[in-house]
C-alpha cells in the first residue's frame, strides 16, 4: 500500500478569466499503488463539446482500467483520448493541449502534447521544465530565441503537435524520474505561465507551505497584472511531502529468475501460446464489459435517466473501439447521440435556454425511434413541457415588470397565474420560485395596507385631539374609539393603550364625578336649630357643591362668651343661601332679622 506510506497533497485553481466559458480542465486519481494527474487546455471553440474535459476523462478512465508506469501504456492512454476527440469532431475539430503525470509515489513519468507545462521544483529551485511542442520552442532549441522570451513570443501558440490533430499524433513521453521528499510538481496551462515569470514562481513557492497557498498566490499574481484580457487559467500543485521508500532490489536475482522463466517458456513453446491466451482473455473481458455497459445504458434510457445512459453508452462504445467491432460501434454511437441530445436539452432547460432545449429534444426525437430503449413519447413530453415552461417564463417576467413598477396587485395576479401554470407543467423548481415571489408581493401589499391604516388611525387621533380642545368630548370619544379599533387591527398595542387613556380622559370631562354629601356634626345640628329654612331642606338633594364661606364674613364670638355647640344663625344662613338660590326661593326675612339681633347682642 504505497499511498498509505507516502504523503502527496494536491490543490488546484481553474477560472475562466475574462471569458464566459472555462475551456481548461484538471482532474486526478490517487490509487493505492499509483496516481495520475492530468491537465488540459481546450483549443477549440465548440460550445457543446468540451475537448479538455473529454481528453482528461478518457485518459483517467484508461489509467484506472490498467494503471502502469510504462511508456507504452501511457502512450496508449493518450492515443485513446486522441481518437475520441477525432471521432467526436463532427461540427468543429476538437483539439487540446494535454499534460499527464503518472507516479507510483516513488518515481514519475510525464507526457505532453501542445503547450501545457510541468514545473518540477526541488529544494526551492527549478529541477526541470517540460518542453512545449510549439514553434517558439523549436526556435529556442535552434538558438534563435532566448529562454526568457519564450513565454511572450508571438509563436508560442503555434503548436506543432496537439491532441485531436488530423495527421500524425506524436506526444512526448519522459523516462522515469525519481521523486524526493519535498518535491513540488506544478502543472499549468498557458493562462498561468504566460503571466507568471519563473522568478515570481520561485518567490511564490518560498512563501507557500502547502499546495493551496501556492495556487492561490499564482492566481493573485495573474490578476495583479490587471491585463485587459485574462485568458482561461489553471494551476495544479502536487506536494510530495513524503515519497514511498522502496526496498533495494537484488537485480542479479531477478535477472536470473526472468532468464530461467523465459528460457522455460521458449523451450516449452509456450511463449506464443501464453501471449495469445492473454490477448484472448483481454478481448473476452472487453467484450463482456461492452455488453454490460450497453445493457446498463438501455436500462437507464428506459427509466428516463439519460445522463447515466450517456455515460454507459460512452463506455460501451470505447470497448467496441478496442475490439474493433464496427457494427456495435455504430449502434452504440447512435444511442449515445440520442442520450447526449436529451441530456443537453435537460441542461438547457436548467439554464433557462428553452429554445435550444427544444432543438436538442427535437434532434433526439428524430432518431429515438430507431432504438428500442428510447421512448419517443417521453421525449415529446419534454418538448411540450419546455414550451410550457418558456411561456411560463414570459408570464413570470411580466409579473416582475409589474412588481418593479409597484403594481403589486397586478403582479400578484400574474404570479398566481404563473403558479397554476407551473403546477400543470409539473415544474417544481419554477413553482417554488413563484411561491417566493408571491410571498414577497403579499408582504409588499400588507406593508402598504398597514401604512395606510396607520395614517388613517393617526388622522382620527388628531381629530379627537381637536375635539378635546374644542370641549366636544363626545366627538373626541368617537374619534378615539375608531382610531383604537384600527390600531388594534394592525397590532399597534402601544397606540391602543394610548387611545384607552385618551378615551378615559374625555369620558371624565363628559361625565364629571359628583362629590359625596357632607354629614359633619355642625351641619346636622343646624337642622334642629333656630332659623332653619324648610325650603332649603327640601332642595338638599339637588344642591351643587357647597361653596367655602370666607373667614372675614363669619362673626367671631364675643369675648367671655361660651361657644354654642350648635351652629350660629349666620352659619345656617350661609348654608341655606345656596339652596334658596338653587330653588329660586327668596331669602328668609326672619332669618336675616334674627341674625341681626344676635349680632347686635354680641356686640
Image (tube, rainbow, N blue to C red):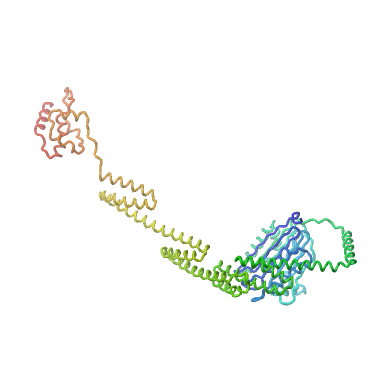
Whole-percent x, y for residue 41 in the image:
67, 69
Quadrant showing the N terminus:
bottom right
Instruction: Decide if residue 135 is in sight here.
Output: no
Whole-percent x, y for residue 337 in the image:
63, 72
Position of residue 136 relative to residue 424, above or below, is below
- Which residue is located at x 50 percent, y 68 percent? 393
Whole-percent x, y for residue 571 in the image:
16, 31
Left or right of residue 253: residue 312: left
All told, the count of numbered labels is 0
Question: Farthest front residue?
Answer: 372
Foreground residue among 204 and 47: 47
Q: Quadrant of residue 382?
A: bottom right
Instruction: Decide if residue 159 is in sight here.
Output: yes
Q: Quadrant of residue 532?
A: top left
Quadrant showing the C terminus:
top left
Whole-percent x, y for residue 419 in the image:
47, 64
Q: Quadrant of residue 178?
A: bottom right
Amino acid at each position: 500500500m504505497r499511498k498509505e506510506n507516502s504523503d502527496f497533497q494536491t490543490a488546484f485553481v481553474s477560472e475562466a478569466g475574462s471569458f464566459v466559458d472555462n475551456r481548461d480542465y484538471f482532474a486526478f486519481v490517487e490509487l493505492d499503488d499509483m496516481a495520475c494527474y492530468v491537465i488540459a487546455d481546450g483549443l477549440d471553440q465548440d460550445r457543446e463539446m468540451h475537448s479538455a474535459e473529454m481528453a482528461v476523462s478518457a485518459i483517467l478512465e484508461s489509467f484506472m482500467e490498467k494503471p502502469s508506469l510504462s511508456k507504452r501504456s501511457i502512450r496508449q492512454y493518450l492515443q485513446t483520448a486522441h481518437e475520441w476527440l477525432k471521432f467526436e469532431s463532427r461540427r468543429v475539430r476538437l483539439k487540446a493541449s494535454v499534460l499527464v503525470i503518472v507516479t507510483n509515489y516513488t518515481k514519475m513519468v510525464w507526457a505532453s502534447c501542445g503547450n501545457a507545462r510541468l514545473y518540477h521544483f526541488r529544494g526551492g529551485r527549478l529541477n526541470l521544465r517540460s518542453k512545449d511542442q510549439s514553434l517558439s520552442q523549436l526556435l529556442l532549441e535552434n538558438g534563435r530565441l532566448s529562454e526568457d522570451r519564450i513565454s511572450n513570443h508571438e509563436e508560442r501558440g503555434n503548436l506543432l503537435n496537439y491532441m485531436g490533430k488530423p495527421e500524425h499524433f506524436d506526444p512526448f513521453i519522459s523516462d522515469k524520474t525519481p521523486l524526493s521528499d519535498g518535491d513540488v510538481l506544478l502543472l499549468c496551462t498557458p493562462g498561468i505561465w504566460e503571466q507568471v515569470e519563473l522568478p515570481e514562481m520561485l518567490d511564490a513557492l518560498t512563501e507557500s507551505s502547502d499546495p493551496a497557498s501556492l495556487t492561490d498566490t499564482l492566481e493573485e499574481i495573474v490578476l495583479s497584472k490587471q491585463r485587459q484580457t485574462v485568458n482561461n487559467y489553471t494551476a495544479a500543485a502536487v506536494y510530495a511531502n513524503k515519497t514511498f521508500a522502496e526496498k533495494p532490489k537484488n537485480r542479479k536475482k531477478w535477472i536470473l529468475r526472468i532468464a530461467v522463466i523465459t528460457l522455460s517458456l521458449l523451450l516449452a513453446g509456450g511463449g506464443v501460446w501464453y501471449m495469445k491466451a492473454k490477448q484472448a482473455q483481454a478481448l473476452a473481458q472487453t467484450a463482456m464489459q461492452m455488453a454490460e455497459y450497453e445493457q446498463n445504458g438501455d436500462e437507464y434510457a428506459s427509466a428516463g435517466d439519460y445522463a447515466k445512459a450517456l455515460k454507459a453508452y460512452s463506455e460501451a462504445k470505447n470497448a467496441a473501439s478496442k475490439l474493433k467491432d464496427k457494427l456495435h460501434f455504430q449502434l452504440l454511437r447512435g444511442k449515445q447521440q440520442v442520450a447526449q441530445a436529451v441530456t443537453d436539452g435537460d441542461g438547457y432547460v436548467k439554464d433557462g435556454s428553452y429554445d435550444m432545449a427544444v432543438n436538442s429534444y427535437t434532434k433526439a426525437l428524430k432518431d429515438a425511434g430507431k432504438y428500442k430503449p428510447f421512448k419517443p413519447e417521453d421525449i415529446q413530453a419534454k418538448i411540450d413541457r419546455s414550451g410550457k415552461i418558456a411561456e411560463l417564463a414570459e408570464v413570470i417576467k411580466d409579473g416582475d415588470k409589474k412588481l418593479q413598477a409597484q403594481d403589486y396587485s397586478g403582479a400578484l395576479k400574474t404570479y398566481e397565474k404563473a403558479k397554476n401554470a407551473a403546477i400543470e407543467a409539473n415544474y417544481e423548481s419554477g413553482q417554488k420560485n413563484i411561491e417566493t415571489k408571491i410571498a414577497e408581493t403579499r408582504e409588499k401589499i400588507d406593508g402598504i395596507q398597514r401604512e395606510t391604516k396607520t395614517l388613517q388611525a393617526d388622522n382620527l387621533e388628531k381629530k379627537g385631539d381637536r375635539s378635546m380642545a374644542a370641549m366636544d368630548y363626545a366627538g373626541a370619544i368617537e374619534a378615539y374609539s375608531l382610531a383604537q379599533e384600527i390600531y388594534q387591527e394592525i397590532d399597534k398595542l402601544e397606540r391602543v393603550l394610548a387611545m384607552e387613556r385618551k378615551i378615559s380622559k374625555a369620558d371624565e370631562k363628559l361625565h364629571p364625578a359628583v362629590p359625596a354629601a357632607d354629614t359633619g356634626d355642625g351641619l346636622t345640628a343646624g337642622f334642629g336649630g333656630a332659623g332653619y329654612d324648610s325650603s332649603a331642606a327640601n332642595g338638599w338633594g339637588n344642591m351643587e357643591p357647597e361653596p367655602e364661606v370666607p373667614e372675614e364674613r363669619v362673626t367671631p364670638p364675643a369675648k367671655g362668651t361660651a361657644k354654642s355647640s350648635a351652629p350660629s344663625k349666620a352659619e345656617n344662613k350661609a348654608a341655606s343661601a345656596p339652596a334658596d338660590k338653587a330653588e329660586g326661593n327668596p331669602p328668609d326675612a326672619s332669618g336675616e332679622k334674627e341674625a341681626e339681633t344676635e349680632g347686635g347682642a354680641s356686640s
